[in-house]
Image (tube, rainbow, N blue to C red):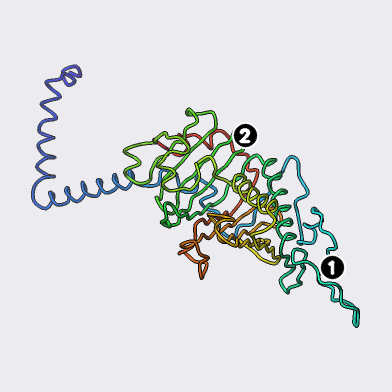
Amino acid sequence: MVCAFLHPSSLLCWYRPMLRSIRLYLLTGENRLNTCASLMLLLVFAVFHWNSDPEACGGDPIASARRSTPLLLVSIAKPVPVKVQSIQQALEQVEVPELVADSASPPAPHAAPAEPKAHSEEVIPSPAGTVLNGRVALQASHAQLVQGKLLLERTSDYSAQFKRQERIAGSLLDPQAMNLKVRHEPFSLYMKWTEGDKGRQLIYVQGQNENKVLVQIGGMAGRLTGALAMSPDDHRILAESRYPATSAGLLELTKIILTHHETNLERGTGVVSEIRDGESFDNRPCFLTTLVYENPTVNADYYKSLILIDKELCVPVNVKNFTWINGQAPATDDEESLIESYSYTGLRINTQLSDNDFEKSKYKMR
């Protein structure tokens, strides 16, 4: 009897009436409307799932970090003496003749006036801290960044929120913001856009994928095309960035600024320099370096540079560069003359990033 029930002909005799009843119930009268509504709802959920952020909520500790989150230092293996409390301490690293020992101390009453110092050695007290001008300012800024470069070279990895805005082919692009992970050995990079092409992801690992960058654009289109392999200086990357993908990160930014500083110091003229204490960025104390170039023959790209250097880490956490307008200095520093803007917030150092943090599978890249 059991065998007879399980025979295919018996199963068909039993299923056909049941399927006919279900079809009549679902596709007649008011039930048809309910069935159509249910199918539409399932379709909406399917499209939403297909086009949604592939990373689970809370899966990336960077995404939940607040702008005001203090920087986290985690066991730097070989610490370097980078903590600087004042510009005066920074200047101890450079040779500055006849520098006033305590810039905040007023001269003694009725003292004979001292001989005027050269502009490059001027020290001006201010309520916010010390301000240095001229060559001394450039030397102090250079000394800070050298310390920052040393620290980054001894740092295994870091993560941050990175924001950039650049002028490409004469046009200022919209701002882009992304979660950033960087490992120095081997150089590895992961970016996920949170502003701009939201959802776009980029992975680069030196020595892997034929040294190419894997890019998956955001949204539905990215799910259909999957990850695209391209060279770091591919024209599609340079259409949105002034530098190749492998130039991303704090270390490369520090090296680029140091190159400009060294050129300015070697030239000795053509730039007005200032470094100011008492500034802050991302709720952290900073020095502000300001460079103003005299004309485009001194620096064809930049008219003015504003560089905020973290006082503890000595790294540039916010940089804004302005360019010339028709070969002339702009009247104001605004979007009309902005050529580059970079910022790093929520910086976390030595978080022990692993190979898995730079794998496609971790971020469901197709």
On screen, residue 220 versus residue 173, left or right, reads: left
The amino acid type found where label 1 is placed reads Asp
- Direction from residue 294 to residue 14 in the image, left or right: left
Marks 2 and 1 in Cβ contact (< 8 Å): no
**SS for callout 1:** loop
Residue found at the far top of this picture: 3
Q: Mark 2 points at which residue?
A: 185
- Eye-nearest disc, 2 or 1: 1
> Which percent across, then down, holds residue 209?
47, 29
Q: Which residue is drawn at 59% across and 56% down?
A: 298
User: Considering depth in this image, is 5 or 362 the residue closer to the camera?
Assistant: 362
Residue identified by numbered label 1: 102
Instruction: Give residue 162's position: percent from left, percent from top.
Output: 53, 52
Q: From this view, report whether residue 164 is shown above or below residue 76.
A: below
Check residue 230 in the rendering and tell me which mark sits there, or answer none: none
* Amino acid type of the residue that numbered disc 2 sits on in the rendered structure: Glu
Q: Which residue lies furthest to the bottom in this view?
A: 110
Mark 1 surroundings within 10 Å by alpha-carbon count, few (fewer than 14), some (14 through 19), many (20 or more): few
Q: Where is residue 245 in the image (x, y as percent from the top left)?
A: 50, 41
Identify the secondary structure beneath mark 2. Answer: loop
| Mark pair 2, 1: CA separation | 43 Å
Q: Left or right? Give the position of 229 relative to 160.
A: left
